[in-house]
Every structure is written in C-alpha cells, then in structure tokens.
Amino acid sequence: DTAVSQTPKYLVTQMGNDKSIKCEQNLGHDTMYWYKQDSKKFLKIMFSYNNKELIINETVPNRFSPKSPDKAHLNLHINSLELGDSAVYFCASSQRGTGTEAFFGQGTRLTVV
Amino acid sequence: QKEVEQDPGPLSVPEGAIVSLNCTYSNSAFQYFMWYRQYSRKGPELLMYTYSSGNKEDGRFTAQVDKSSKYISLFIRDSQPSDSATYLCAMNFGNEKLTFGTGTRLTIIP
C-alpha cells in the first residue's frame, strides 16, 4: 500500500492551460505539503496544510492554488501554466510538530511546452 | 547565498569505501537536521534525523551535527552499489518547513 500517492506521474501540457495534481496519504498524518524540485534537484517548499488549514504559504505565484478537502488529501491546481513551471512536484506528509520524518510521494513530472 | 549549502558532486567512490557527505548552513536557529536519499525518478526518503548537536548511528549510516560550526555530515560505511543516489540534507526550526540543500549525487562503483 503506497503511503503518499500522487496522480498523475507525468503531465505534459501547453502554455496557458490549467492543470491539477492530486495527492493522498494513508499514514494518518496531520500535515501535508507541496514541494517543487527544479532541474538542478533543488527542493523548495511551496505550501503546507494542517488538518485542512493552510499553515505555510511560501512566495508562490497566485496561479498556484492548493486545496485540502480533508486531512488525507491535498491537491494542487495551476492556472495559466508557464514554461518556468516545468519541474517535478512532490507531495509529502508528516505528523504535526517538528516536521521531521516527512514522507514523500513519487512526484509529478510537469512539462510545459 | 542559499541558507543551506551542499556540494552537488558528482561523487564516485569504489564499493566498500567510507563515504562522507556534508552540508553547511547559515542560520544558527536550525534545530532538526535530516538526511534524505533520492533515487532517480523517485521521491526523497528519510534516512536519519538528529536534534541539535551530536551523533546518531543507524546501521551503516552515521549522522553528525556540529552546531558551533554550522556543519552536518552523513557517513556511509561499507558503501554498496545500492547506495548510489542523490543525498539531500534538510533542516528546520522545529516547525513544518524543511529547508533543503541542493543534494549530492553519489555513485558507488562495483
């Protein structure tokens, strides 16, 4: 049973389109995250939710909108996609608190053409 | 300057060697220090974490934190080809936000 699962695994789309990535965790964790990993492998946090409440919102364009329908799910919707949005997006989860022991999904490789 | 600096490598060592991976950081308020391993086309997986200064050992892996020098290390003993991956250090202030290094790509040569 996959602990943190993301769909889709690959996403190729044209500039200007709107797309969504879905994430689900079955670990019973309180906190979920979206991270972006660029072509140089640098991993940077975008958002964090705790029990459906947004607790971290880094400097991310407002074209990116996370949504957490419940504490086991965190989706990421991206409007008006740009070439620079091409990256691997990782969902992760952890227990509330120190943020240690975060479990990551397999990633969604987004390519904007 | 990034908050967390990590030599990107690549680093190639023969099988059986001891591997030393390092990160430096600038913010002395960091409290928790983690090492993640990331295989190609996979998500990062947590190897170890330590709180504040000191050492922690888990099998072939040893993590060291020196807060006075703002320097952390991961040692891998008896390295195996299956250890070939990118190793990412990460740290936080005791909250949910992890700050990552850029990762070191490691190859163990059989």
Image (cartoon, rainbow, N blue to C red):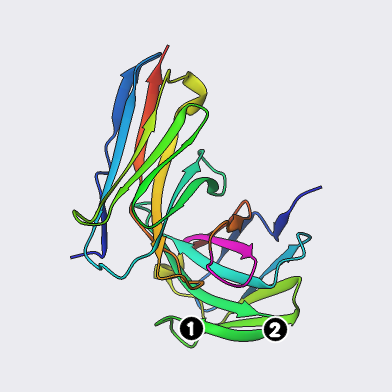
**Where in the figure is residue A25, as x and y percent of width and height?**
74, 62
Q: Secondary structure at mark 1?
A: strand
The foreground one among A8 and A82 is A8
Q: Which mark is residue A52?
A: 2
**Where in the figure is residue A18, as x and y percent of width and height?**
60, 78
Q: In this orientation, does residue A113 appear?
A: no
Q: Is residue B44 above or below residue A78?
A: above
Q: Residue at x 56, y 76 (%)?
A: A48
- The chain containing the residue under callout 1 comes to A
- The chain containing the residue under callout 2 comes to A
The foreground one among B57 and A67 is B57
The overriding secondary structure of the stretch rendered in magenta is strand
- Kind of residue sitting beneath label 2: Lys
Q: In this orientation, does residue B90 appear?
A: yes
State which tag comes first along the sequence, 1 or 2: 2
Considering every residue shown, the one lying at the far right of the view is A1
Q: Which mark is residue B101?
A: none
Q: CA–CA distance between discs 1 and 2?
A: 13 Å
Q: Residue at x 50, y 39 (%)?
A: B40
Where does the N terminus of chain B fall, quadrant-wise?
A: bottom left
Mark 1 surroundings within 10 Å by alpha-carbon count, few (fewer than 14), some (14 through 19), many (20 or more): few
Q: Is residue A61 above or below residue A106?
A: below
- Kind of residue sitting beneath label 1: Asn
Q: Which mark is residue A57?
A: 1
Magenta stretch: give its range.
Answer: A87-99
**Where in the figure is residue B17, as x and y percent of width and height?**
34, 17
Where does the C terminus of chain B fall, quadrant-wise?
A: top left
In this picture, residue A9 sits left or right of residue B100: right
The foreground one among B109 and A38 is B109
